[in-house]
Image (cartoon, grey):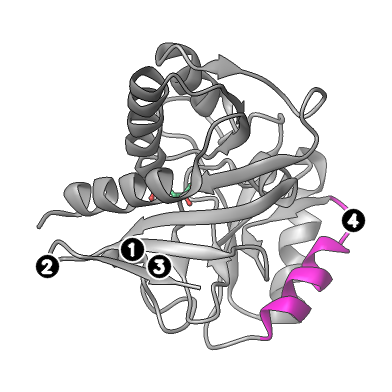
Amino acid sequence: IMAEEAKKLAAYAAVDNHVQNNQAVGVGSGSTIVYAVDRLAERVRQEKLNIVCVPTSFQARQLILQHGLSLSDLDRHPELDVAIDGADEVDARLTLIKGGGGCLTQEKIVAGCAKHFVVIADYRKDSKALGQQWKKGVPIEVIPMAHVPVGRTIVRRFGGVANLRMAVSKAGPVVTDNCNFILDWKFDGARDWTEVNTAIKMIPGVVETGLFVGMADRAYFGMEDGSVQVRD
Ligand code: DER
C-alpha cells in the first residue's frame, strides 16, 4: 500500500487504542497527524466523547478548529492523558528524530506533559538506527542571533554539518511558531543520543533539539502489506 494509506492505518490504530472519554489529548504536527485528527473528530461525533485538544503548532491548532474539536492549552491542562504525534524516524529503542515539519519545540513540550506519548508513522520511518532512513539530519531550534556560533559549536564537537533551514514559500530562513530559526544537523554514524541531546541543549542559544530520547511509550507503524506494527 502507499505511504499515505499506511499513515492512516497507524493513526486510526493509535486513536482507537488510546483515546477515551473525558480526556485531554495532545495533538502533534505534520501530515500523519491529519489522519489522527480526522479519526478523533469522527469518534467524538459518533461516541459523543468529551475531549479537549492541546495543539503543538499553528498547524495543529488549525486542524483542531477546522474539525470542530474543543481547543485547549497547557494553562488549563498542564497534564495530558495522551499525546499523539508523528516522527521523521523511530529507532529500535523508540528514540525519535522529529522536527521535519519544524514544530519540534512545542511537540516536545506537549509530549513531556502527557501521561502517554504515542507515535504514529508509516513504514518509511521505521529504522534500526537514527540516520539510516532519515537523511535530513536532526532539527535544532535556535535563537536567531546565535545560529552561526551554535552551528559551529555542534560541528566542532559532534562532526557532520549544520545547515540553516531556508524557507520555500518565504524569502530567507524558516521562522518557527516560536519565532526562532532551525539548524538541520547532518551527522554520520551512531551516537549516544542521550549524551548528544543533553550536550546540544546546553549550548547557549539552543532552544530545543529534535531528538526525543526516552519519551515515546509506543509507536504504531502502518506497514507496506497493510498491517499495523506496534513497538513498545
Ligand atoms: O515536524 C514534526 O516533528 C512532525 O511531527 C514530523 O516529525 C512528522 O511529520 P509527518 O507525519 O508529516 O512525517
Camera sees residue 137: no
State left or right for residue 215 relative to residue 29: right
- Rendering coords of residue 150 (x, y %): 78, 59
- Which region is colored magenta? 192-205
Crowd tier of the residue under label 1, counting other residues whose Cα lies within 10 Å: few below 14, some 14–19, many 20 or above: many
Query: In this rendering, which labeled residue sits more in front, label 2 or label 3?
Result: 2
What's the residue type where badge 4 is placed? Pro
State left or right for residue 183 relative to residue 127: right
Q: Which mark is residue 204?
A: 4
* Residue sitting at x 77%, y 80%: 195
Label 2–label 1 contact, CB within 8 A? no
Task: Name the residue beneath numbered marker 1.
Answer: 221
Query: In this rendering, which labeled residue sits more in front, label 1 or label 3?
Result: 1
Give the Cα distance between marks 2 and 1. Answer: 11 Å
Query: In this rendering, which labeled residue sits more in front, label 4 or label 1?
Result: 1
Task: Name the residue beneath numbered marker 2.
Answer: 225
